[in-house]
């Protein structure tokens, strides 16, 4: 805009904010929501609202996977340096080096209103499919987590629409274990805005863990473990309590975007 009108960005800011009382807002990257996806989000959110009263939400294990790399993650909007001259800033502060293919690790984690799982690190070279998902995560962590944290009471497992989650063998695992779960026909598609791990947890963890780069994967894993345990349980509880509010927002928006 400043190029079009041949005036400075600061001058435009004054006109927009001070003179017109408007705000400059960033465009957000979101999942594509086709008409069919919106309809499914609306229908399934309604069903989940009917199924999941607050007492039920308190006993849902929300889970997800995320890829973390050893690279520093920066926010260009906030990551700034104040100096009278660019030349006065040391090179190591001015630049954030980027590797073409940084070392990375896939991490699985889960939360409930009153607890959290262990973080599971997928071994290097292992592809997450239905078999490895059941062995590394469901058998190794989810089953024991349910027994430890919910005892003999009924509880529910949530997972999104990733292929390893929706595979018939994975869905059957929950039935065989007699664990209630949100099936692939029940979870709204393209809905990271409904999973607390996506809308409230991973970003916090990444902000803490990737504030600076790591020398290797071992350092990254150790930092992930440490920062995961530092997140207050109250933060998880508030995120879980937002679930119903967000379902209601999806219904209100007729399956459309709910993020501001």
Image: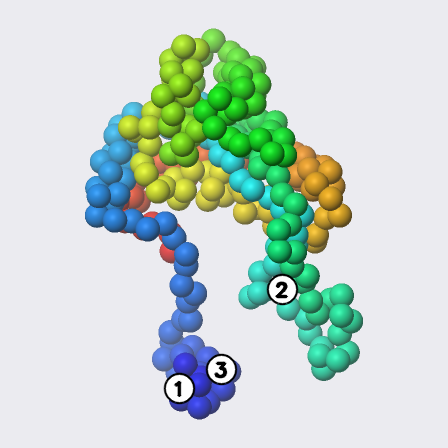
**Distance between mark 1 and mark 2 Cα atoms:** 27 Å
Up the image or down, 86 lies above or below 222; here it is below
- Residue 10 locus on image (x, y percent): 51, 82
Residue sitting at x 70%, y 69%: 94
Q: CA distance from mark 2 to mark 3?
A: 19 Å
Q: Which disc number belongs to residue 79?
A: 2
Would residue 213 be visible to someone looking at this image?
yes
Of residues 217 and 125, the one nearer the viewer is 125
**Distance between mark 1 and mark 3 Cα atoms:** 11 Å
Left or right position of 148 against 154:
right
**Nearest-to-viewer mark from 1 and 3:** 1
Q: Which residue is mark 3?
A: 9
Q: Quadrant of the N terminus?
A: bottom left
Return the disc, 1 or 3, that comes first in the chain's sequence: 1
Secondary structure at badge 1 equals helix
**Which residue is disc 1 drawn over?**
4
């Amino acid at each position: 805009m400043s190029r079009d009108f041949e005036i400075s960005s600061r001058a435009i800011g004054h006109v927009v904010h001070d003179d017109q009382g408007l705000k400059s807002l960033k465009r957000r990257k979101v999942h594509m929501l086709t008409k069919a996806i919106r309809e499914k989000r609306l229908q399934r959110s309604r069903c989940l609202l009917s199924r999941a009263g607050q007492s039920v939400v308190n006993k849902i294990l929300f889970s997800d996977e995320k890829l973390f790399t050893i690279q520093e993650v920066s926010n260009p909007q906030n990551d700034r340096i104040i100096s009278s001259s660019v030349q006065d800033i040391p090179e190591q502060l001015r630049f954030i080096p980027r590797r073409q293919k940084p070392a990375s690790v896939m991490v699985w984690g889960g939360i409930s209103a009153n607890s959290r799982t262990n973080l599971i690190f997928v071994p290097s070279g292992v592809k997450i499919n239905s078999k490895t998902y059941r062995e590394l995560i469901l058998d190794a962590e989810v089953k024991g987590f349910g027994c430890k944290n919910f005892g003999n009471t009924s509880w529910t497992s949530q997972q999104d629409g990733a292929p390893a989650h929706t595979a018939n063998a994975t869905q059957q695992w929950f039935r065989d274990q007699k664990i209630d779960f949100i099936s692939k026909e029940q979870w709204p598609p393209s809905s990271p805005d409904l999973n607390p791990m996506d809308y409230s947890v991973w970003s916090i963890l990444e902000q803490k863990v990737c504030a600076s780069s790591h020398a290797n994967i071992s350092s990254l894993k150790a930092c992930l473990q440490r920062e995961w345990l530092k997140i207050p349980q109250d933060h998880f509880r508030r995120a879980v309590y937002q679930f119903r509010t967000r379902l209601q927002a999806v219904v209100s928006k007729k399956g459309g975007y709910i993020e501001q």
